[in-house]
Image (spheres, rainbow, N blue to C red):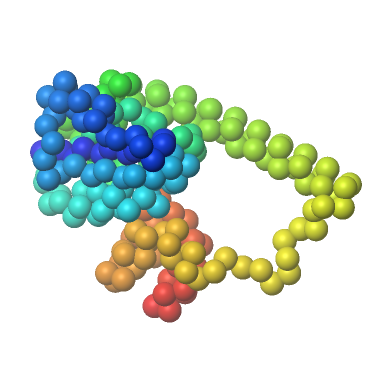
Amino acid sequence: MVKFLYLSRVSSVGQNSSRQIESFRQHGYLASDNVFIDKCTGNTPFFERPEAVKLFEVATSQPKDVSVTVVIDSIDRLGRNLLDILSTIEVFTKNSINLKSLKEGFETLLPTGGVNPMSQILIGILGTLAEFERTRIRERQAEGIAIGKVQGKFKGRKVGSIQSTQRLLERYPIVVNKLKKGLSVRDVGEITGNSTTTIMKVRKALAL
């Protein structure tokens, strides 16, 4: 079994990771080469964080017969956005990566490699909350657009405006990496959890 520790410093610039490291030590985990520490805002999606991307690459490159566990101090270290946390857990599970959260006291996979029923209950609750959050976001967006139109402030998306190629590639570093290695769109989708449409856009941007 291979274990990786993931820490993130997501508040003020002056915040350090000592509390998280102490939490790992209290649970029997010591600092080693398998520690990945990101220094970013909590609003940054997990797979847009430099160290998180490195962690995922190393974790998925392990031999198939080696079980992999990523240990975090608490689930909010994956991001403060519920939708992003849920998406990250799903990608980990698809890639047979066990996620262990010390504060919440759960693991997503069983020692046998199967999905942990208790974690599925938690993920189900998260999914319900995420859907509620999606609905609220859509409602607020609709209300904002309606008010903007009345006030003459909302004119819609500028005709011909598209996401820059550089920004697109920066948003999906793992997809870029897998495509450059020659993996098919389908394989990349299974590994990363991204849609075929997104992967095709990235591949087009890379001119592969």
x then y, percent, for residue 202: 45, 67
Whether residue 114 appears in this view of the structure is no
**Tally of marks:** 0
Farthest front residue in view: 14
Tell me: residue 196, above or below residue 124.
below
Quarter-wise, where is residue 102 in the image?
top left
Quarter-wise, where is residue 190 in the image?
bottom left
Q: Is residue 120 left or right of residue 137?
A: left
Q: Is residue 78 left or right of residue 20?
A: right
Quarter-wise, where is residue 21 in the image?
top left
Looking at the picture, tell me which residue is in the foreground, 69 or 112: 69
Point out the image quarter for the N terminus: top left
Whether residue 39 appears in this view of the structure is yes
x then y, percent, for residue 76: 39, 31
Q: What residue is rendered at 53% in x and 33% in y?
A: 130
Q: What residue is rendered at 13% in x and 36% in y?
A: 31
Q: Is residue 153 left or right of residue 187?
A: right
Q: What residue is rendered at 37% in x and 60% in y?
A: 173
Looking at the picture, tell me which residue is in the foreground, 156 or 99: 156
Tell me: residue 38, above or below residue 130.
below
Point out the image quarter for the C terminus: bottom left
Q: What residue is rendered at 44% in x and 54% in y?
A: 194
Farthest bottom residue in view: 207
x then y, percent, for residue 182: 29, 71
Looking at the picture, tell me which residue is in the foreground, 39 or 13: 13
Q: Is residue 161 left or right of residue 152?
A: left
